[in-house]
Amino acid sequence: MPELPEVETSRRGIEPWVTGQSVLRTEVRNARLRWSVDEEIIALRDRMVLSVQRRAKYLLLELDSGWIIIHLGMSGSLRVLAQPQPPEKHDHVDLVMSNGCIIRYTDPRRFGSWLWSENPYTSRVLAHLGLEPLSEEFDGHWLYENLRKKKTKIKPCLMDNKLVVGIGNIYASESLFVAGILPDRTAGSLNQEEAARLTKSIKVVLLRSIKQGGTTLRDFLQYDGKQGNFLRELQVYGRGGEPCLVCSTPIQLAKYGQRSTFFCSKCQS
């Protein structure tokens, strides 16, 4: 599933193509996504795009008449087409722009969503979300204070969007490895130094992935159709049984909350 780095990569990719341009029309070939594409989007005509923002794993297109909230689901991606191209089977939504380009949404599994909102930050999909991990507020003190009474494992806590958003399975495993913290540690057992180390590691891992265009495991593509290159930099995720790149100890694989978790029993404690 596309996580924060993949969504941020998509945001940065489409932003220069749509900001200040008008959506001439939408072409919705299949409105049956996770939820049906809202009628306001289907009927959209000649509306200016004021900005492209991101909140957690959602893309927010600010128009002069409202907002489009896009979630990429498990297999969705947005591409910029400089010239019209015939749509393929899984190309469900197009934004036809005034500069001649098309923003095309592709989603083989159709678990994504296109919603309309007058105020996205109070909408049902965004109102409950936690802190952004790349914000200044997300630091060691904040994390320590919000974890110190929790008795659950640290990895599921990092993936709880009501606490902090956008840290999916890949990035939780990678961040805990960089911080030297075992994923099955009780969240409340982290001291202030470990919490500070972990917040720093999360920011480093997320920013590195954004720089590499995200991680492509199966379906995710960047705005230009290329795969995300962070897969080449993964240190533990997907490497169960292979030697640790730091100490050569075999990488361990466990499941917490039905999610595969990768770690090094020597580098992490």
Image (cartoon, rainbow, N blue to C red):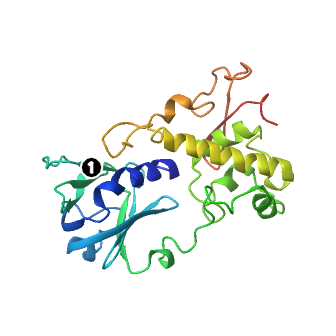
Residue drawn where x is 49% and y is 58% of the image? 57
Residue drawn where x is 25% and y is 76% of the image? 39
In this view, the residue in front, 98 or 241, is: 98
Decide if residue 14 is on the left or right side of residue 99: right
- Asked which quadrant contains residue 92, the reply is bottom left
Q: Position of residue 252 (x, y in %)?
A: 69, 30
Q: Position of residue 139 (x, y in %)?
A: 73, 57
Residue pointed to by mark 1? 80
The C terminus is located in which quarter? top right
Q: Is residue 252 above or below residue 29?
A: above
Q: Position of residue 241 (x, y in %)?
A: 64, 23
Q: Secondary structure at mark 1?
A: strand
* Residue 110 in view (yes/no): no
Q: Position of residue 244 (x, y in %)?
A: 68, 23
Query: How many numbered dots are placed on residues in this image?
Result: 1
Decide if residue 141 is on the left or right side of residue 131: right
Residue drawn where x is 70% and y is 37% of the image? 178
Q: Is residue 60 above or below residue 123?
A: above
Three-letter code, disc 1: Val
In this view, the residue in front, 255 or 53, is: 53
Q: Is residue 112 above or below residue 221?
A: below
* Residue 263 in view (yes/no): yes
Within-10-Å neighbours for mark 1: few <14, some 14–19, many 20+: many
In this view, the residue in front, 261 or 200, is: 200
